[in-house]
Image (spheres, helix red, strand yellow):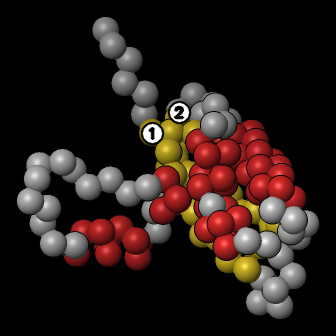
Amino acid sequence: MTATGTTALPGVAAEAALAVPGVAGLQPRLAQRLAAAAEPTRADTTPHRMPPEAGLRTDRAPDGSGWHIEVRCVLTEGRRALDIARNVHDRVTAAVIAHLATHGAAEPVTVAVTVTGIAARHDAA
């Protein structure tokens, strides 16, 4: 598999997760949030935003036999979290397998989905 195929993997997984109805966003892990907070203050006033891939963890299996992907997502309220998590699992798995296949690497993929929060809807009056 090409290096491009593996470096694009988190983006493919993030895009698939964010396309699921009911996913408000992806939650970065604590270490990533702390690292971003420790960065020097930006000279411009543009707020620093983490890429969606920060809400994912993609690792090769220790024996090199496949991939393990952890998706940490925040959901919108008013829907069943279990249904959304299952949908995220299925879509991310399918997207990553398809991506790997296009790069000539048919490998097993394990996806774990963690719901880290529920975002309240703010309806306009």
Relative image position of residue 42 (x, y in whole percent) = 14, 61
Q: Is residue 91 above or below residue 120?
A: below
Q: Amino acid at mark 2?
A: Glu
Relative image position of residue 11 (x, y in whole percent) = 59, 55
In percent of the image, x 73 and y 80: which residue is there?
60
Q: Is residue 57 above or below residue 98?
A: below
Look at the image and tell me whether residue 57 can be seen. Answer: yes
CA distance separating discs 1 and 2: 6 Å
Secondary structure of residue under mark 1: strand
The residue wearing badge 2 is 77
> Does 81 sit left or right of 117 as displayed?
right
Q: Amino acid at mark 1?
A: Ala
Relative image position of residue 82 (x, y in whole percent) = 72, 44
Q: Is residue 57 above or below residue 86?
A: below
In percent of the image, x 81 and y 67: which residue is there?
110
Q: Is residue 97 above or below residue 24?
A: below
| CA neighbours of label 1 inside 10 A, class few (<14), some (14 to 19), many (20+) | some
> Does 123 sit left or right of 5 as displayed?
left
The residue wearing badge 1 is 119
In percent of the image, x 83 and y 91: which residue is there?
63
Say whether marks 1 and 2 touch (CB < 8 Å). Answer: yes
Q: Foreground: 123 or 25?
A: 25
Look at the image and tell me whether residue 71 can be seen. Answer: no
Q: Foreground: 42 or 118?
A: 42
Q: Which quadrant of the structure image shows residue 5?
A: bottom right
In percent of the image, x 81 and y 62: which residue is there?
103
| CA neighbours of label 2 inside 10 A, class few (<14), some (14 to 19), many (20+) | some
**Which mark, residue 81?**
none
The mark nearer the N terminus, 1 or 2, is 2
> Does 28 sit left or right of 92 as displayed?
left
